[in-house]
Image (cartoon, rainbow, N blue to C red):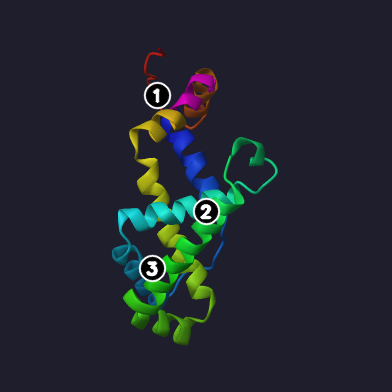
Amino acid sequence: MVRVIARTATFLTVLSCNSFALAGVYTDDLSKCLVSSSSVTDQATLVQWIFSALALNPAVMPMSSITSQQRDALNQKAAALDERLVFTDCHKEAVDALKYEGPSTFEAAFAVLGQVATRGLMSDPAVIGGLNAMGSYTDKGKVAELYKDAGLPAPIFPAQK
């Protein structure tokens, strides 16, 4: 349970970077094309680019050692990836989405790609371990009480190391 809370909190934090309206059929088609046309390497590039941009926030800047040259290189890689996906791999879907649902379709479709890319990186065992580490600081009594208040049996927590 604690692991689920940690993963969910992290995932929702990443996803809250972009808000968008419910997607239409053409945005859905574009989203599907972006995901199916991007490789694991492409998705890692996207997450690296997002990370490099997030690292500019003063709250996390001291924790990152990304140089301006590295950030510039990631900006170039991400732009090339976006161009390939929109202008080549998913051109038809991009045209249809733009034509029938407007420019905001790109934000929604790339948010889906970002979600898939983030989910892929979050499945790495080291990342899972890092996310699960928060659980050792979570008050299991409060979690059990929450379950009790919901009329559910308390979860069984794994033994701590």
Residue depicted at x 50% and y 41%: 10
Label 3: how many Cα within 10 Å (few below 14, some 14–19, many 20+): many
Q: Which residue is mark 1?
A: 155
User: Can you tell which of label 1 and label 2 is closer to the viewer?
Assistant: 2
92 vs 136, nearest the viewer: 92
- Name the amino acid type tagged 1: Pro
In the rendered image, the quadrant that contains the C terminus is top left
Work out how far the residue at label 1 is from the one at label 2, CA to CA, in angstroms.
35 Å
Label 2: how many Cα within 10 Å (few below 14, some 14–19, many 20+): some
Q: Which residues are magenta?
A: 132-139
- In this view of the protein, can residue 1 be seen by the observer? no
Work out how far the residue at label 3 is from the one at label 1, CA to CA, in angstroms.
36 Å
Dot placed on the residue nearer the N-terminal end, 1 or 2: 2
Residue located farthest toward the right when viewing the structure as drawn: 58
54 vs 116, nearest the viewer: 54
- In this view of the protein, can residue 106 be seen by the observer? yes
Circle number at residue 31: 3
Dot placed on the residue nearer the N-terminal end, 3 or 1: 3
